[in-house]
Amino acid sequence: MPIITAPATTPPPRPPGVGTPVPLPEIGLATATYTDPSGTVWPLTDELAGWFTLSEGVSGLADAVEYEYTTDAQPRGGERLRHAQPLPRAIVWPIYVYSDHTHMEFIERWRALAQAFTRTLRPGPDGRRPPGVLEIARPDGSRRRIRVHYRDGFKARGAQGTGILSDTAIVTLWCEDPFWYDADAVSVHREQGVGRDFLNPYPSVSSSQVLGATTVTNPGDETVWPTWTITGPASLVEFTVTRQHMTDDGIETTTEAFTLDPAEVGHGPLLAGQQVTVRAEPPQVRYQDGSNWIGALNFPEGVLWGLEPGVNEVTFALTGSGAGSAVDLQFNPRYQTA
């Protein structure tokens, strides 16, 4: 399936050397950047930037996610695991800030970095506190990211000789979602073919409903909740996933599905080129003009399903489809470690 690169904020010019991998504890050679909520990209492993990461003390990158168990006592002893809740992750990142020239240059760099991290605690227009993004890039070009909020640690050491031309901050970053995600999104596209005359030039059939029963592979370690973009014409859309699980009684097949009916929000069928976007996490349905179409879903029986690690059998079915009808499924694989 095609791989498309996720949109990225254009960073300001960076000093030379930011692309050179450096050894980091737990994960080996890599480069690291931090993108604050304003979209500014801060190199973390470039000594020429005026600050750089102190490798000794970095932690929380290669640790598997910690879980809190919910269990049920068993009548014959022991317990059965009912639920495992992923816990937030903490990443410790020591940063050495310096100036080769003046005290004020050092102070400006210190203040700028402190603002970049603490900006994650500032409420946005919607009242939410947008996270920053820590990115780890490997020498092979692969990149994994995690959303972070500043927790503590941007403090002057107060030791003799520090705070004039240099100082070290031991920053702790809090990750509400403890999983790393791939910077490159996986995309699956299905589009209605152009219909043809059944007898001209030879007997043929073009589907008017099912755009594709396809296999979608999630290469990550964890379930992901994708985004679907539907392009009309279509009067009714149904998305289904079929999986097989091993149980005590053998292999069990399960199916989850949801439908989107534009008539439920008073719109009528989608016309050619009209689009609706459905997000699974958090649940959200938006028409192309930004209006809320959550009422078009068949809740509560419908399930905005996720893609489990490995192979998922998926079907996109559109009633009233025609030339130009399309479905685009997109997700970023999630991982336990950087």
Image (cartoon, grey):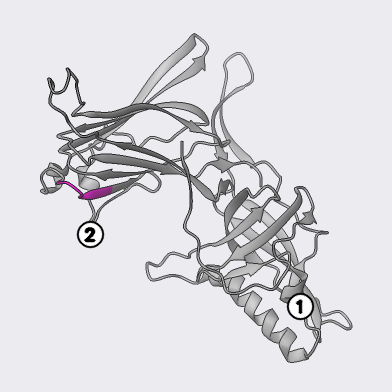
Q: Nearer the viewer, residue 134 or 250?
A: 134
Q: Nearer the viewer, mark 2 or mark 1?
A: 2
Instruction: Verify whether residue 322 appears in magenta.
Output: no
Identify the residue shown where x is 39% and y is 48%.
282
201 to the left or right of 179:
left
Disc 2 residue crowd, few under 14, some 14–19, many 20+, Cα 10 Å:
few
Rounded to the nearest angstrom, the CA distance separating label 2 from label 1 is 48 Å
Say what secondary structure mark 2 lies in. Answer: loop
Disc 1 residue crowd, few under 14, some 14–19, many 20+, Cα 10 Å:
some
Mark 2 vs 1, N-terminal side: 1
Report the amino acid beneath label 2: Asp
Residue at the outermost right position: 160
105 to the left or right of 148:
right
The mark found on residue 156 in the picture is: 1
Reading the image, the residue beneath label 2 is 289
Q: Is residue 169 visible?
A: no
Identify the residue shown where x is 66% and y is 44%.
337
Report the amino acid beneath label 1: Ala
The mark found on residue 279 in the picture is: none
Magenta stretch prevailing secondary structure:
loop
Q: Is residue 332 visible?
A: yes
Q: Nearer the viewer, residue 35 or 119?
A: 35
Span of residues in magenta: 271-276
In percent of width and height, residue 85 lies at 55, 39
In percent of width and height, residue 112 lies at 63, 79
